[in-house]
Image (cartoon, grey):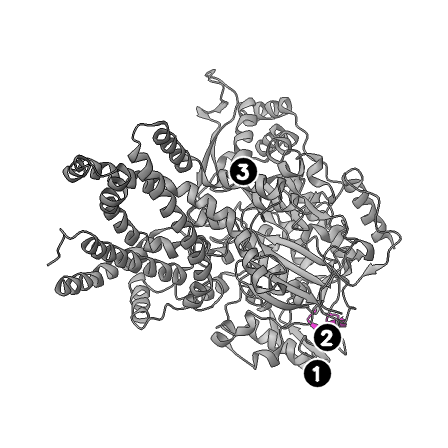
């Protein structure tokens, strides 16, 4: 096992290197430079000052040199400074990370809880009205545009009923509230985004857990259990459920990058100060250092997530052994 | 005193019927409060809260309230002193002598002096500082501090817009501790600004909000509105919901929002006036097809600008006649727009030898059909819509116009900068000073410069040069009104429309006014706005 782990970790290094190289390359190939916003059709700017800005940002050097410089800094864990506001990339990420983590943890837990419940119960009552209704419900959530659902809920619960705020994470007077009120204020702001995120993200996991459960229910040992006269309840929850969990558990590892990645659409609609907007803004303004910083961290977490998924698999399923 | 009167006339002719929801002031009977919060929203977060480094709108909005320049524009787009008490300009226009206001203090209590202005200037021309404004100051020859409240700036050549450039926010030398280059770019004060302005910085929650509070020691008097909150709401539809929910006090509407149900605007005042920008259809004058002015005239008469304004802007705009804004003093009200006369267009074109000889509905001459490609940039729906409407309108007189929409940086680098286009739809944002030398002077035709239609009129050249040299406002007014007429008559562009600026403000605020400078910023007199005491919505918790 240890040997296997070491080998996997060893393989991650060239993989990570390749990912960053590709990211950098794609960024360079895509049209536009970070200085364009300042210089394009800006009549108040002479050609010399344009050149000077390009030089200040180091964009006049060949991309290979730019990448090498970036790499040299990153191995010392220095992600550089944002082109947009000259602040350290790490600090910019740190500022947004807690908000994204909070939102994603809450909505992912909700998704897991709801998906397991829905998936397993609909497998148990296969082809029933409940099963069909669940399938329809999760597919509607999956296919309806996020922004549309979000806007409808905002109009309904925010504007018309006035029970939750429309957007943002804090009320304007947040600093003046007592700790309890602060908690309530946060929850009120989180209610809509978490709900929308769960609604739209439910489909995949529900279907996974449903089919996992179905597969288990077809196994011989379930028939045996039933033949022994074990009550159906016990068959489902004692014998089937635990085994159906195995493929679902591994999915948790794969969700790791999602935890910090953040979603641009949710965060934009709910004016939520998270990682998704940071990344999107960085793409739009060609803020290379921020883009590379986020790219590297997310790539690293994805690789780590894959590894974790494999390890969890081994723990959950005794039939699997790594060598 | 003829000038203000003329301006008033121009104003009334354009605004007379335009302020639709001019409600009766509800302010009467209650004194102005030194209280309440004004909540504005913005699509994006600020970058640098430092006027030398910032170029985005969000940072600009905050910096404008925290910092002051030496000069500023008044309501009639004329420069007046801000941190400068007064100034003299030498006869030859080469030397400015600024007399600074006494008893101005930075938000941390330090006195403001000429040293701060010198420091600001040094950073603006510092090659290591990431400022987009250095070009405005490269004509400065010498900068001298004569005493703590007097400074003398000598220029290499007389340059009127130089005065405007001193509207640049002045930053405090002592806070930056003489930081230069990289240290200045990365200084923590760019996140926690200290200025001289009516509002001082309180807090910045990244991607959420920026909060300012009134500066009790402001040299222009303590502003009435106690707090200013700048909320970041990246989605326009959500911003509109927040407005309907009365959780923000102002926003700039899109035309369809402006025309939404009346009850959405209960408790709000809507405003409508031209924004500091225009859209145009530009000819590449180097193209043989458009070299003949009569051909351009025919096209000008074939374009129905009213239909454009109605179709593209839902009527929220007005057709343009030239490169200046209707509310500004450089605008020439006597310039008559080309009428929509497609029959006249056809007549002119047939006089020029264009006829549909092969019956395919497209005019031709010497076996060459009248067709060209118009390019515009991707991502601007108004422009592509405009292109489609123009295509239909030109088709009616037998001209085939193809449309090509190109991604922005390719558009600029490969087409505009290299002059590889036949016709183009683009827009210019205007600045309050009417100097448009960089766009229309014949010396600006080189690759990458802004006279990309290759316009060349010696008289316009002469006037533009003079307009940069003459500090006499009356004379400049004549110069630029003449430029307006000449450019209109030469038809290098067909000036299409000025989109309207459609701000809405919560009713309790007294003070928002539409004047010529509003086109360049609706909050130009924000430090004079107030809320009557009996209408304060967010009273301050802490005693004042």
Please tell me whether residue A91 is drawn above or below residue A218 in the rendered image.
Answer: below
Q: CA distance from mark 2 to mark 3?
A: 60 Å
Q: Is residue B332 shown to the viewer in this render?
A: yes
CB-based contact (under 8 Å), mark 1 and mark 2: yes
Q: Which mark is in front, 3 or 1?
A: 3
Quarter where residue B71 is shown:
bottom right
Residue farthest along the top direction in this orientation: B359
Q: Could you tell whether B73 is left or right of B413 in the image?
A: right
The residue indicated by pointer 1 is B146
Q: Chain of mark 1?
A: B
Q: CA distance from mark 1 to mark 2?
A: 9 Å
Q: Which quadrant of the figure contains the C terminus of chain A?
A: bottom left
Q: Which mark is residue B97?
A: 2
Please tell me whether residue B127 is drawn above or below residue B286 in the rendered image.
Answer: below
Please tell me whether residue B125 is drawn above or below residue B367 in the rendered image.
Answer: below
Q: CA distance from mark 3 to mark 1?
A: 64 Å
How packed mark 2 is, by other alpha carbons closer than 10 Å (few <14, some 14-19, many 20 or more), is some
The residue indicated by pointer 3 is A152
Give the magenta-colored segment's residue range: B83-98
Q: Could you tell whether B269 is left or right of A260 in the image?
A: right
């Amino acid at each position: 096992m240890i040997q296997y782990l070491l080998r996997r970790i060893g393989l991650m290094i060239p993989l990570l290197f390749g990912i960053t190289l590709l990211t950098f390359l794609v960024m360079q190939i895509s049209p536009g430079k970070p200085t364009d916003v300042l210089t394009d059709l800006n009549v108040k700017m002479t050609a010399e000052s344009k050149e000077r800005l390009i030089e200040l940002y180091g964009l006049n050097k060949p991309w290979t040199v730019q990448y090498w410089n970036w790499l040299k800094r990153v191995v010392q864990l220095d992600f550089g400074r944002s082109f947009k506001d000259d602040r350290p990339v790490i600090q910019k990420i740190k500022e947004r990370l807690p908000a994204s983590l909070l939102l994603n943890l809450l909505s992912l837990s909700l998704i897991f809880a709801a998906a397991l419940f829905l998936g397993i119960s609909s497998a148990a009552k296969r082809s029933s009205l409940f099963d069909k209704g669940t399938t329809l419900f999760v597919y509607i959530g999956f296919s309806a545009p996020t922004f549309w659902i979000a806007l409808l809920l905002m109009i309904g619960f925010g504007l018309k009923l006035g029970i939750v705020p429309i957007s943002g994470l804090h009320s304007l007077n947040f600093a003046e509230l007592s700790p309890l009120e602060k908690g309530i204020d946060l929850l009120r702001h989180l209610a809509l985004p978490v709900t929308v995120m769960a609604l739209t993200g439910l489909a995949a996991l529900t279907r996974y857990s449903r089919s996992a459960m179905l597969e288990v229910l077809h196994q011989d040992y379930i028939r045996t259990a039933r033949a022994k006269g074990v009550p159906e309840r016990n068959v489902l929850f004692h014998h089937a459920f635990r085994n159906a969990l195995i493929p679902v558990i591994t999915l948790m590892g794969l969700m790791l990058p999602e935890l910090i990645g953040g979603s641009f659409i949710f965060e934009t609609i709910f004016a939520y100060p998270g990682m998704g907007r940071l990344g999107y803004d960085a793409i739009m303004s060609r803020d290379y250092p921020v883009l590379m910083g986020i790219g590297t961290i997310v790539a690293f977490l994805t690789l780590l997530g894959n590894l974790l998924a494999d390890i969890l698999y081994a723990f959950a399923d005794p039939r699997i052994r790594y060598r | 005193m003829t000038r203000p009167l003329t301006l008033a006339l121009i104003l009334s002719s354009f605004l007379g019927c335009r302020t639709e929801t001019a409600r009766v002031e509800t302010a009467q009977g209650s004194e102005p409060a030194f209280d309440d919060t004004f909540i504005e929203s913005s699509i994006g977060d600020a970058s640098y809260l430092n006027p030398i480094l910032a170029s985005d709108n969000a940072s600009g909005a905050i910096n404008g309230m925290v910092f002051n320049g030496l000069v500023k524009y008044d309501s009639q787009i004329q420069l007046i002193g801000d941190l400068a008490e007064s100034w003299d300009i030498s006869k030859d226009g080469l030397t400015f002598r600024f007399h600074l206001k006494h008893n101005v203090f930075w938000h941390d209590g330090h006195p403001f002096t000429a040293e701060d202005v010198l420091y600001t200037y040094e950073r603006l021309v510092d090659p290591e500082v990431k400022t987009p404004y250095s070009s405005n100051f490269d004509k400065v020859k010498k900068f001298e501090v004569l005493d703590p409240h007097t400074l003398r700036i000598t220029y290499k050549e007389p340059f009127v817009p130089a005065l405007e450039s001193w509207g640049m926010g002045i930053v405090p030398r002592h806070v930056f501790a003489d930081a230069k280059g990289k240290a200045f770019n990365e200084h923590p004060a760019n996140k926690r600004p200290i200025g001289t302005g009516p509002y001082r910085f309180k807090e910045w929650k990244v991607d959420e909000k920026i909060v300012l509070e009134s500066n009790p020691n402001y040299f222009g008097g303590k502003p009435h509105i106690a707090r200013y909150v700048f909320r970041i709401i990246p989605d326009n539809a959500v911003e509109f919901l927040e407005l309907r929910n009365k959780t923000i006090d102002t926003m700039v509407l899109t035309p369809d929002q402006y025309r939404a149900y009346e009850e959405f605007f209960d408790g709000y005042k809507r405003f409508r006036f031209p924004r500091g920008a225009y859209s145009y259809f530009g000819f590449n004058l180097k193209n043989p097809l458009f070299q003949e002015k009569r051909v351009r005239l025919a096209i000008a008469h074939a374009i129905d600008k009213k239909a454009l304004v109605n179709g593209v802007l839902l009527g929220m705009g007005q057709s343009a006649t030239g490169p200046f804004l209707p509310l500004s003093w450089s605008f020439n009200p006597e310039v008559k727009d080309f009428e929509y006369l497609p029959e006249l267009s056809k007549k002119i074109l047939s006089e020029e030898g264009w006829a549909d000889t092969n019956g395919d509905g497209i005019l031709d001459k010497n076996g060459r059909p009248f067709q060209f490609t118009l390019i515009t940039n991707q991502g601007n729906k108004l422009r592509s819509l405009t292109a489609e409407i123009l295509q239909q309108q030109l088709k009616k007189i037998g001209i085939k116009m193809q449309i090509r929409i190109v991604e922005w940086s390719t558009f600029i680098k490969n087409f505009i900068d290299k002059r590889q286009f036949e016709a183009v739809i683009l827009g210019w944002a205007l600045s309050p000073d009417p100097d448009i030398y960089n766009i229309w002077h014949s010396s600006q035709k080189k690759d990458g410069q802004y006279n990309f239609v290759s316009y060349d009129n010696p008289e316009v050249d002469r006037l533009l040069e003079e307009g940069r040299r003459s500090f006499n406002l009356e004379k400049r007014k004549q110069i630029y009104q003449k430029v307006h007429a000449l450019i209109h008559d030469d038809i290098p562009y067909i000036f299409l429309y000025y989109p309207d600026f459609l701000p809405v403000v919560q009713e309790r605020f007294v003070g928002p006014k539409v004047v010529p400078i509003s086109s360049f910023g609706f909050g130009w007199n924000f430090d004079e706005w107030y809320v009557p005491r009996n209408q304060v919505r967010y009273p301050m918790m802490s005693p004042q």
